[in-house]
Amino acid sequence: MSDLNKLGLAEARDALRAGDTTSVDLTEACLGSIEAADALNAFVHHTPDIAMDQARAADARMGPDAPAMCGLPIGIKDLFCTRGVPSQAGSGILKGFKPEYESTITSQLFEAGAVMLGKLNMDEFAMGSSNETSVYGNAVNPWRRGNDDTALTPGGSSGGSASAVSADLCLAATGTDTGGSIRQPAAFTGITGIKPTYGRCSRWGVVAFASSLDQAGPMTKSVRDAAIMLEAMCGHDPKDSTSADLPVPNFEALLKGDVRGKKIGIPKEYRLDGMPEEIEALWAEGRQMLEEAGAEMVDISLPHTKYALPAYYVVAPAEASSNLARYDGARYGHRAKLDQGDGITEMYEKTRAEGFGDEVKRRVMIGTYVLSAGFYDAYYNRARKVRTLIKKDFEDVFAQGIDAILTPATPSAAFGLGEASDDPVQMYLNDIFTVTVNMAGLPGIAVPAGLDKQGLPLGLQLIGRPWEEGDLLNIAYGLESAVGFVAKPTKWW
């Protein structure tokens, strides 16, 4: 078989079990494609020796009872701690940090036989929507606008993961989603990305941004692949107090593609002033396709949606300022050079000033401000109350029998690197369709659904009931089947 790196997880798994290829061959194909893709800057820590050792072990284990992920080469977002491998969260303050432990999710993937090709680029501490805040430099989208050679963002913060999967550098990748950081990059690069219900995947060993919002998930080439990888990533973890002790279903077995009788909500609040016609048209097409497949489309209201973005940008920076206080130069990572007479306060100040990038500093300062004594009730407590109202909006809708909610994934297609980086508020608006899902702790999936007039991918988002990722994946599978999206970026790198 040629072009093994272009396979999805399901195809590669079936080929491995049939004896048509080996994990070593798959891994070598991916490593070769990574070596030839420096222009994308997707992989930032390469682990070919580990990959080949894992591939050989997977081949020795291969058989009818091998787990679905056995022998499949994937990329790991740099936010996941990996034993003995640099884990910097895209930040200079963690330069040189090699954990002596493995995150629960990567442990589970490796126990299932997955192969780690390397660590993937990301916005610093997952704070960004364009992968332009990384200490490694920008990750680049493999898609281009027609014949224009402008470098485009792959989205953020999981930009390296999105770019690598879209460009066939790996079969799939891990991502994390705090306000849309799986779903927005997936939409920008024409792939599938699912954020599961908060608590479905362990956060232990994943560098924290905002602990009540962060959730890991898979970024894959299809909905079926997402179902396969998500099952391997889920499960109760006693080391994470927010991890849910619930059985993990066989998500792939639930993919029937039959949406007949399903009630799909269309929220009126997601129709924004100034929304591009192409996004509006794509949403209408998605609605029509699901209706033709037998789903019942219901107009719904989520009245507190307009408050989600401002509330998110109070809650998330507040939690970030608390979580990032541990990076002080005293225990691990970067430590600033001190002048004679400097004490511990100067060490903290200089280390954090040197180690953190501008966006991280901005959010830490916002977070510290809203948590300060004079403003705690005015900002943070009020944002928490708004969050409760947002969550209740969804509960009320689901109580009416709605099975899933259909929305756009992003307010635009991928934009050029540098085009929005000087306007933080404009950048934050990229999360407008996704942050509600994190605020309510719900599962959400982005599915590629079409191309804009410049040939760039656009995605639709489905939001599901809590803990019902299986049903959400099935509805997404029905949408994917109806859309028939098969476009790939033209190779220029």
Image: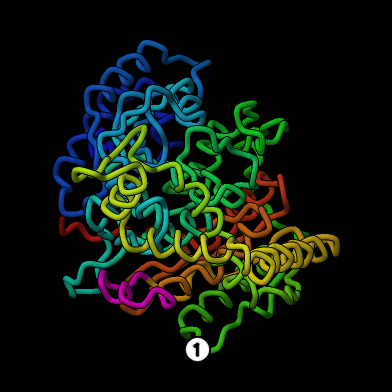
Mark 1 neighbour class, 10 Å CA radius: few under 14, some 14 to 19, many 20 or more: few
Residue at 38% over, 22% down: 100
Q: Position of residue 374 (x, y in %)?
A: 62, 68
The answer to whether residue 165 is visible is no
Most foreground residue, 444 or 456: 444
Does 216 appear above or below 418?
A: above
Q: Position of residue 166 (x, y in %)?
A: 33, 52
Q: Is residue 431 magenta?
A: no
Which residue is denoted by mark 1 in the rendering? 274
Q: Residue furthest right?
A: 400
Does 370 appear above or below 102?
A: below
Q: Is residue 424 magenta?
A: yes
Residue at 65% over, 35% down: 243
Q: Which residues are magenta?
A: 414-426
Secondary structure beneath dot 1 equals loop
User: Is residue 483 left or right of 165 when viewed as pictured?
Assistant: right
Most foreground residue, 391 or 350: 350
The answer to whether residue 104 is visible is yes
User: Is residue 283 left or right of 396 when viewed as pictured?
Assistant: left
Q: Position of residue 171 (x, y in %)?
A: 36, 40
User: Is residue 264 left or right of 21 when viewed as pictured?
Assistant: right
Q: Residue furthest top?
A: 60
Does 61 appear above or below 457?
A: above
Q: Position of residue 226 (x, y in %)?
A: 51, 43
Most foreground residue, 41 or 453: 41
Residue at 42% over, 48% down: 221
Quarter of the figure with the C terminus: bottom left
Residue at 55% over, 41% down: 227
Predominant secondary structure, magenta span: loop
Which residue type does callout 1 highlight?
Answer: Gly
